[in-house]
Image (tube, grey):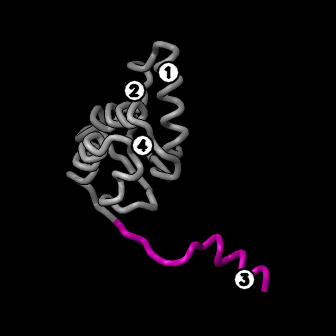
Amino acid sequence: MTAQGLIEDLMLSKRQGNLVERLLFYSRLHLLIIDELGYMPITREQANLLFQLISMRYEKGSIILTSNYNFDEWGKVFEDPVVASAIIDRVVHHASIFYISGESYRLKNKLKKAN
């Protein structure tokens, strides 16, 4: 799921008073995939919710996380650099990190079709 979709779901659960149950749901998944982290800015409140989830899953379940930002740029994504640092700390501790560079495959395919 996208990071924004996950955050919106956690925010809604918080407003409805069932945040703990929702966090438990996500923490029990065998694999959690969070796509496009940083595509949209993340407020301090949203970052705290994301931290709670990542902290609950820490050393208990796998996370695949995609972002167009390097870790040293996450301060731009999160309003709170302390929370950003704490999230990075937990995410990278047992991680395999893959950096992918190059042009967008979507743009590349679009340009091929245009020619």
Tell me the number on the disc at residue 23. Answer: 2
The amino acid beneath tag 1 is Ser
Determine the residue positioned at 72% across, 75% down: 110
Q: Disc 3 vs disc 4: which is toward the camera?
A: 3
Image-quadrant location for residue 114: bottom right
Chain-order first, disc 3 or disc 4:
4
Where does label 4 land, which residue?
Answer: 32
Where does label 3 land, which residue?
Answer: 112
Cα distance, mark 1 to mark 2?
A: 9 Å
Q: Is residue 108 left or right of residue 34?
A: right
Q: Disc 1 vs disc 2: which is toward the camera?
A: 1
Q: Is residue 71 left or right of residue 21?
A: left
Where does label 1 land, which residue?
Answer: 13
Asked which secondary structure carries label 4, the reply is: strand
- 52, above or below 58, in the image: above
The amino acid beneath tag 3 is Lys
Marks 1 and 2 in Cβ contact (< 8 Å): yes
Give neighbour class at mark 2: few <14, some 14-19, many 20+ (Cα, 10 Å).
Answer: many
The amino acid beneath tag 4 is Leu
